[in-house]
Amino acid sequence: MIRATKIVATIGPASSEPEVLLKMINAGCDVVRLNFSHGTAQDHRQRAEFVREAARQAGREVAIMADLQGPKIRVGKFENGRTTLLAGNPFVLDSACELGNDDRVGLDYKDLPRDLKPGDTLLLNDGLIVLSVARVIGSEIHTIVKIGGELSNNKGINRQGGGLTAPALTEKDMEDIRTAMSIGADFVAVSFPKNAADMEMARQLANIAGAPYGIKPKMIAKIERAEAIPALQSILDASDGIMVARGDLAVEVGNAAVPALQKRMIRMARESNKFVITATQMMESMIHAPVPTRAEVSDVANAVLDGTDAVMLSAESAAGKYPVQTIETMAAICIEAEKSEQSELDKDFLDRTFTRIDQSIAMGALFTAYHLGAKAIVALTESGSTALWMSRYWSHVPIFALTPRTSSERTMALYRNVTPLNLATNVDRDAALAQAVEVVVGKGYASRGDIIVLTVGEPMGQAGGTNTLKIVRI
């Protein structure tokens, strides 16, 4: 059975060596995430080269995602590296403080005092420490510790309910976009966007930086601010896909709200013809353990059943003891969950209208393959749009997207139920169709007597030109 749900794996100290990357790709990694919160431009450049080489050895294209750090609001450093906060005690966050102690600590976001008022709740270190704002005096935020604990250097700060004014793109992010384009990143993930304008600005910067390299990356909005929820549809419209970034989002809106938001975001993304990634702590225990918890298995399976395009690993593959085994385990969970998925294609198509010829052909192919019991759908595509539209609906019929464009092949590595393959020609229709049949049969996905459904554009070679549906019995 072909796995439909894709796997995004973050690489870091545990997974940057070429031989480990090759094992990860062979285990099922479809997209490699470079976390720009850590490492230098040269680190990312070298890792990207290793990814491309490992993918070449594995015989398939693997996409690269550049994940920008964004305005991560953090405390500064302590003179002893850490302190312990006790419930009921006062503690000061001071933007003018250089080195922290037991009474106060500095801030890397100097405007934080302007965003706060008495009564606000601050959550530090992913919500493990809770402070209540008592008053704000100049550069100082005087707080009372509600829930204490150990606080160490550079831990993150969130305001409960959101509302911080930090811009989505920092100067570092703008420089990182230039680095990402120079190494050929296929996706750029934008951290903490509040609205569509944040994504439009990021896209414009990425397109300008990518122009010398002939790159227009797909833009991913990481939904992790409370303000992004009411603006979700407009953010979707301005993006190519979204990431359900459950860590910071949970801190801002509360853990209990996240599961329902996850389902809503996945549904809205699919209805908007956008892809969606579900991330954060999916297999967290496998950082240290060779097997996941039962709850983690259910978490991954539920994301699959919700219809996510991809599930993502962070520290599990970047710094964990078992990066390859974690990917193998996640892939097995995805396949088992997909077996139980019910296709509701007829219901999905009710009250839907398709105004574009290429989209109508894509939907016709999906509907035809489902009702004829076809073994495969083969889409000959330039941009990958046809495959994306097909992948928004679940039919249990695998979709093979053949394209002459390497960039499209890598982009489609993230689309649910789509297997991207290289097409040798984009001008000779008969040769292309013959190659398509040969590829599907040669890889064992179909055999003599089986039906496959093909889509192609005539004349070939034009993006958005799909206008032909063909049914072939092998």
Image: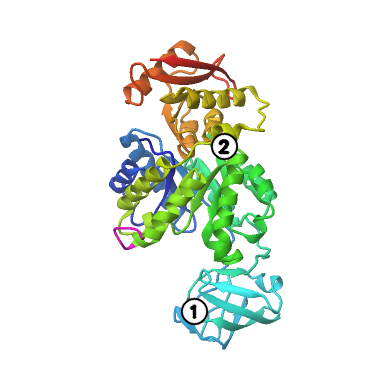
Residue to which mark 1 is pinned = 78
Left/right of residue 33 with respect to residue 207 in the rendered view: left
The answer to whether residue 42 of the structure is visible from this angle is no
Q: Position of residue 219 (x, y in %)?
A: 58, 44
Secondary structure at numbered mark 2: loop
Asked if the residue at tag 2 contacts the one at tag 1, i.e. Cβ–Cβ closer than 8 Å, the answer is no
- Is 171 placed above or below 118 here? above
Most foreground residue, 175 or 132: 132
Q: Residues within 10 Å of mark 2 (few under 14, many from 20)?
A: many
Report the magenta stretch's main SS.
loop
Quadrant, the C terminus: top left
**Residue 266 location (% of width, % of height):** 56, 47
Assign a secondary structure to mark 1: loop
Residue 288 showing in the rendered view: yes
Neighbor class of circle 1 (other Cα within 10 Å; few <14, some 14-19, many 20+) is: many
**First to last magenta residue range:** 288-293
Residue 216, labelled with which disc? Answer: 2
Name the residue nearer the viewer: 58 or 6: 6
Examine the image and state in which quarter residue 146 appears: bottom right
Residue at 31 percent across and 41 percent down: it is 26
| Above or below for 138 versus 37 | below
| Residue 99 falls left or right of residue 118 | left
The quarter of the picture where the N terminus appears is top left
Residues 171 and 20: in front is 20
Is 426 part of what is drawn in magenta? no
Marks 1 and 2 sit apart, C-alpha to C-alpha, by 42 Å
**Circle on res. 232:** none
Q: Position of residue 318 (x, y in %)?
A: 38, 56
Rendered location of residue 275, percent (x, y): 55, 42
